[in-house]
Amino acid sequence: MNILVYVFAVLSVIFAINMLFQKKMVNVALSLMGCMASLAVLFISLYATFVGLLQLVVYAGAVMVLFLIIISLVDPFGKIKYAFSSKLWAFFTGIVGIIFGLLVYVIYKSHKAINTIASSKFDIKALSHRLFTVYLLPFEVVSILIMVGIIGAIYFGKKNLDSGEKDEDNS
Amino acid sequence: MRITPDFFVILSVILFTIGLIGVLIRRNLIIIFMFIELMLNAVNLSFIAYSYKLGQVDGQIYVFFVMVLAAVEVAVGLGLIMLIYRNKKTLDVDDINIMKN
């Protein structure tokens, strides 16, 4: 069990670093899919079975299918470049260093503040009970949010948004 | 010997930093979007790790909400990306500068 966790942790980091260096969009998407699947295994190893399976279905399934459809719709072989202007590199390194340092500092402080409570095995019954009692209002609000998102996506998918002015595109 | 939750928190910090580097150095709109998804996943991992560490199930519920938000974000964001591509014929963020001066 332990060796499996270490293997998938290293695998997720390798997939994530691979995303940085791939040239084609499809390869980046496949690396992201591998990283998400590895993270799903790590979730399940932390007794978050429901969330791990949801990660596989929603992220590695639905979201990646959406990404691949969009990649196939736009130009998949266009040239892809990095921000190689040397003036920006110091700026980027500064931002990344500051945020990384802040995260490490906060985690070090929280590691000293929180002591571990052992023997916590969650089942889906406790999760769903809490979701439908305490978190019922956020659950319903999120369902409204999904509907708004669907309407927005359909609106952005229209052929030309300001129709009535330029209708010369009859294809 | 069990693996401590701190291991997963450190892993989530590493993944988040990689996602941040990717957002900064890649210039393609869709690839930047994928790195944002990677950062969301890293935050989810830290939620799960702290949920395990504190023995409470609330962190998993937050992860559930984050996943729903990410799905909506992907649907709307990819619609926007298609709109930009149809109007500008490019996905390079350096060429999308209509707000500049």
Image: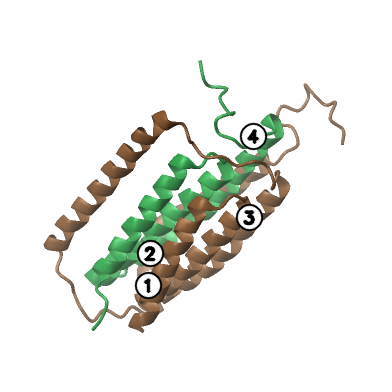
Relative to the observer, which residue lies in front, A85 or A168?
A85
Question: According to the image, what is the colour scheme of the structure?
Answer: by chain
Q: Which chain is brown?
A: A
Residue picked out by circle 4: B84
Residue at screen point 21% across, 57% down: A107
Residue A35 badge: none
Pair 1/4: label in front: 4
Along the polypeptide, which appears first: circle 3 or circle 1? 3
Q: Secondary structure at mark 3?
A: helix
Residue picked out by circle 2: B61
Same subunit, labels 3 and 1: the answer reads: yes
Gap in angstroms between the C-alphas marked 1 and 4: 41 Å
Position of residue A27 measured from the top left corner of the image (x, y, whole percent): 60, 57
Q: Is residue B41 left or right of residue A112?
A: right
The colour assigned to chain B within the rendered structure: green
Q: Can you tell which quarter of the image residue B88 is in? A: top right
Q: Secondary structure at mark 2?
A: helix
Quarter holding the N terminus of chain B?
Answer: bottom left
Gap in angstroms between the C-alphas marked 3 and 1: 36 Å
Mark 1 vs 4: CB contact within 8 A: no
Residue picked out by circle 3: A26
Residue at screen point 69% across, 41% down: A157
